[in-house]
Structures are given as C-alpha cells and as structure tokens.
Image (cartoon, grey):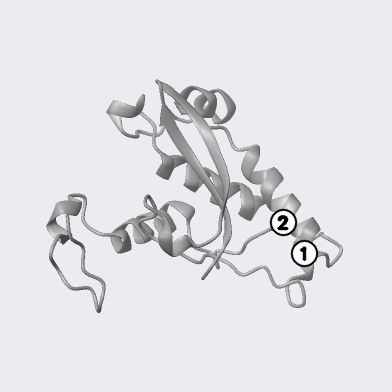
Amino acid sequence: MTSGMLFHAIYAKDNWGLDRRHINDLSTSKSLCLLYRLHTVDLATNGDLATNGDLASAYNKITEVIENVPVGRQARESQFGEVRLGNPSLDGYDCVIWTGDVLRALVKEGLIDLQGRDPDDVMAHARSLAGPEDATTMVNKDFGGLKIIM
C-alpha cells in the first residue's frame, strides 16, 4: 500500500481548479492511470532543498510551489504570457499542461532534479506509458495478472 497527497488540475462546471486530497492506497484510485516517480526527496543526499534537513519543511515547500502554479488556460496565459494548446473541449487547457508547469516550477525552486530532461519531454514519455488514447483497446488484455474488464 502506498499513500500520499494527490494534486490534480480538474475541470468541473466550466471552471478549472486544483484538487488536493490524501490518498490512503494509490492502487485503489479510480482515476489514476499512471504513477510515475520523478524524484525522491532524500534529505540525507539532497541538502540543496533549502529545507534545513527537515522532511516536513520539504513537504510544505513542495506543496507551496504546486499550489502557486496557475490552473486554467486564462490564469496560465495571464501569468506566463505563453499559449499552450490543450483539450478544446476543456477551454483549450488540460491537466498535462498544468503538470508540466508544476514540474518547471519545482525544478526552478531546486526541489526536484529532472537530470536535464525537459518537463514537456518527461510528460510525453509518461503519457506514452499510460496507455493508448482509446482506453477501450485495453479491455480484456492481460497485463501480467491485471486484466481490464468493462
């Protein structure tokens, strides 16, 4: 069992918002399609986190950075002045754009190290691992003991 804090940009009632909630067991998530480890916060080896070697301080700093990333196309464009094309049915934005912005913010603050990889490339790789665009093609296939049945 793996627990943690889930941060996700969500679109509901024609508005974008930040969903932040504790998950007791990630394996039971009904919406999680991929768990992708980017970085391990190890205060013994990552003294550059500027958190005084305190895990709670590291968590609080990471949370603060994530919560300050704009959510939604208009908020993003007004802060960054850059247009990114997202899902047209979601006001031209999507959670993948937001996640890339989060990665850039965490790298900028020195909280994670993507080892020189561009956040957009990291997101493209993660999406390729998450499965096909049409998830129905995965029904009735055996994934090493996990079988998707609809």
Can you tell which mark lies on residue 55?
A: 1
Please give the name of the residue rendered at 55% of the width and 23% of the height, measured from the top-left corner.
Answer: 78
**Mark 1 crowdedness (10 Å alpha carbons): few <14, some 14-19, many ≥20:** few
Residue at 26% of width from left, 72% of height from top?
146
Task: Say which residue appears at 48% left-offset and 30% top-offset.
Answer: 82
Which amino acid type is shown beneath numbered disc 1? Leu
Residue 8 vs 88, above or below: the answer is: below
Q: Which residue is mark 2?
A: 59
Residue 25 position in % (x across, y down): 50, 62
Which of the two residues, 117 or 26, is positioned nearer the viewer here?
26
Callout count: 2
To which quarter of the image does residue 42 belong?
bottom right
**x and y, in percent, of residue 121 in the image:** 40, 57
How busy is the neighbourhood of tag 2: few (under 14 within 10 Å), some, or many (20 plus)? few
Left or right: 141 in relation to 58: left
Rendered location of residue 135, percent (x, y): 20, 53
Helix or strand or loop: what does disc 1 sit on? Answer: helix
- Amino acid type assigned to the residue bearing label 2 in the image: Tyr
The residue depicted at 62 percent of the width and 55 percent of the height is 107
